[in-house]
Image: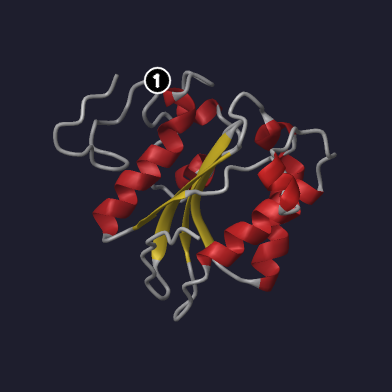
Amino acid sequence: MTQYRRHFVPGGSYFFTVNLADRRLALLTDHIAALRAAFRYVMLRHPFTVDAIVILPEHLHAIWTLPPGDTGYSTRWRLIKSHFSRALPLLESRSQSRQGKGERGIWQRRYWEHTLRDERDFERHADYVHFNPVKHGHVRRVADWPHSTFHRFVEAGLYAPDWAGGDAPDEDFGEPAPVGWVER
């Protein structure tokens, strides 16, 4: 079995990107209540803080902080994915590999994880999370997307209600591009 290198910091804060297997579907927003229920279910059993999140139709970005001494984000994602999947009817096509393992075909098996290093790293990723619905063309203004902690950040005074409007706040958010990277 392939071993993936993950960076575990007890009580750390992490940025995640989690995708549906079929990126043409809108299961996450179509079934937002089931996704919220999956998060509540897991948070009751394995507490963590959702610092920032945006749910898009086919993927989500989140920033979590784990309790002191805890590194178990993999368990939490496995439980969230499985709880959400069990709430949906079995309609998706599944590969023989997934069928053989008793897996649904809803989620990509892997996810992107980044350990946040400092406050600036947290801010860059929170900006990325909240700007994502504009980036993907779902809305023209960040404030118009309902499935986001942006509104909570406004209430806390961290963002102005018109933050980023339809323009990226700056090009310095999210993951830094690798040296020589050209976006196409």
User: Residue lying farthest left?
Assistant: 180
Q: Is residue 155 left or right of residue 21?
A: left
Q: What residue appears at the point 34 percent right and 22 percent down from the top-left corner?
A: 167
Q: What residue appears at the point 42 percent right and 25 percent down from the top-left corner?
A: 135
Q: Position of residue 97 (x, y in %)?
A: 67, 46
- Seen from the viewer's position, the closer of residues 65 and 154 is 65
The quarter of the rendered structure image containing the C terminus is: top left
Crowding near the residue tagged with mark 1, few <14, some 14–19, many ≥20 C-alpha atoms within 10 Å: some
- Decide: is 11 above or below 20: below
User: Residue lying farthest right?
Assistant: 89
Residue type (three-letter) at the residue carrying disc 1: Gly
Q: Which quarter of the figure has residue 46?
A: bottom right
Q: What residue appears at the point 41 percent right and 76 percent down from the top-left corner?
A: 10
Task: Say if residue 136 shows up in the picture.
Answer: yes
Task: Say if residue 37 shows up in the picture.
Answer: no
Q: To which residue does mark 1 refer?
A: 166
- Seen from the viewer's position, the closer of residues 18 and 171 is 18
Q: Which quarter of the figure has residue 40?
A: bottom right
Q: Position of residue 133 (x, y in %)?
A: 49, 28
Q: Is residue 163 left or right of residue 94?
A: left
Q: What residue appears at the point 38 percent right and 32 percent down from the top-left corner?
A: 163
- Seen from the viewer's position, the closer of residues 68 and 93 is 93
Q: Which quarter of the figure has residue 127?
A: top left
Label 1: which secondary element: loop
Q: Position of residue 74 (x, y in %)?
A: 53, 63
- Image coloring type: secondary structure
- Decide: is 14 above or below 136: below
